[in-house]
Image (spheres, rainbow, N blue to C red):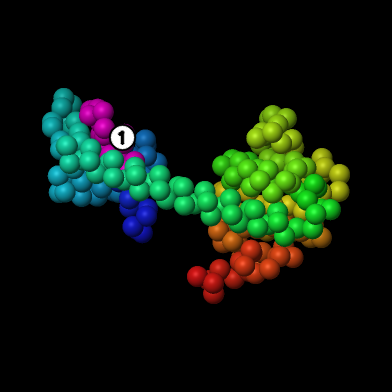
Amino acid sequence: MTAKNNNSNSLELLTALERGEVVTQNALSKRLGVAVGLINALLRRAMQKGLVKARQAPYKRYAYYLTPKGFAEKSRLVGEYLESSLQFFRLARQEYAEIFHRVERDRQSRLVLYGDGELAEIAVLAASAEGVVLLAIVDPKANLEKRHGVRVVNSLAELENPAGVILTAAQRPQEVFDALRAEHPVLPVYVPAFLRVLEAQAGLPDETVIKNPEKAA
């Protein structure tokens, strides 16, 4: 487990315990979406550090609660999380801005974002700052007409002559990229480096798109 993942899990655990509810490790496992074994390890570590205490409750349950030290640690982790999030936001916005900046001006008005969510929102902000008006956001599961002020469609087939697709899919970006290249082999697919997609080819300089992240790491 990396330090980043460990801090994230610890923050989620401390947040879940903040109210001092009577819970089981199974309940915490379901709430946080991680294995019971990891919950057990996190609780043991937190209790050893004096961040969490437990008192017995009816039906062989335990009430886990934060100590003053635990509250302080949670505040520290929240600060780290926010700082990390801001750093990621700045990185993502910069890389999307670089893509918009490098695409030829006559093609910019026909660019499409593929994948809705936080990355699409960041890309829309970057597009606005660069004076780019996007053609649409493609989201196969969407049931709305607009998002972030941009038209939303379920398929690229609904659009006429898009000039290129910018990947904004945070979940399984490699699979989405591979599917796009297979279904639309001629259409350029622009990929920001932070998504770490292999064999991304967008007609942009290597500093914008990582073609082999293992070598670049």
For label 1, the SS is helix
Q: Say if residue 34 shows up in the picture.
A: yes
Q: What is the quadrant of residue 76 in the picture?
A: top left
Q: Say if residue 35 shows up in the picture.
A: no
In depth, the one of 19 and 118 nearer the eye is 118
Position of 163 relative to 198 (above/below): above
For disc 1, the marked residue is 16
Give the residue at the far right of this rendering: 160
Classify 10 Å Cα crowding around label 1: few (below 14), some (14-19), many (20 and above): some
- The tally of labels here is 1
Give the residue at the far top of this rendering: 58
Inspect the magenta stretch and tell me whether residue 68 lies in it: no
Position of 199 relative to 63 (above/below): below
In depth, the one of 166 and 185 nearer the eye is 166
Q: What is the quadrant of residue 159 in the picture?
A: top right
Residue at point 69%, 29% (across, down): 144
Q: Position of residue 166 (x, y in %)?
A: 69, 52
Going by the numbered disc 1, the residue's amino acid type is Ala
Q: Position of residue 25 (x, y in %)?
A: 27, 38
The part of the chain drawn in magenta is 11-27
Residue at point 86%, 44% (across, down): 160
Inspect the magenta stretch and tell me whether residue 16 lies in it: yes
Residue at point 72%, 46% (across, down): 131
Residue at point 65%, 69% (across, down): 206
Position of 150 relative to 83 (above/below): above
Q: What is the quadrant of residue 175 in the picture?
A: bottom right
Left or right of residue 11, residue 107 in this image: right
Q: Position of residue 14 (x, y in %)?
A: 28, 39
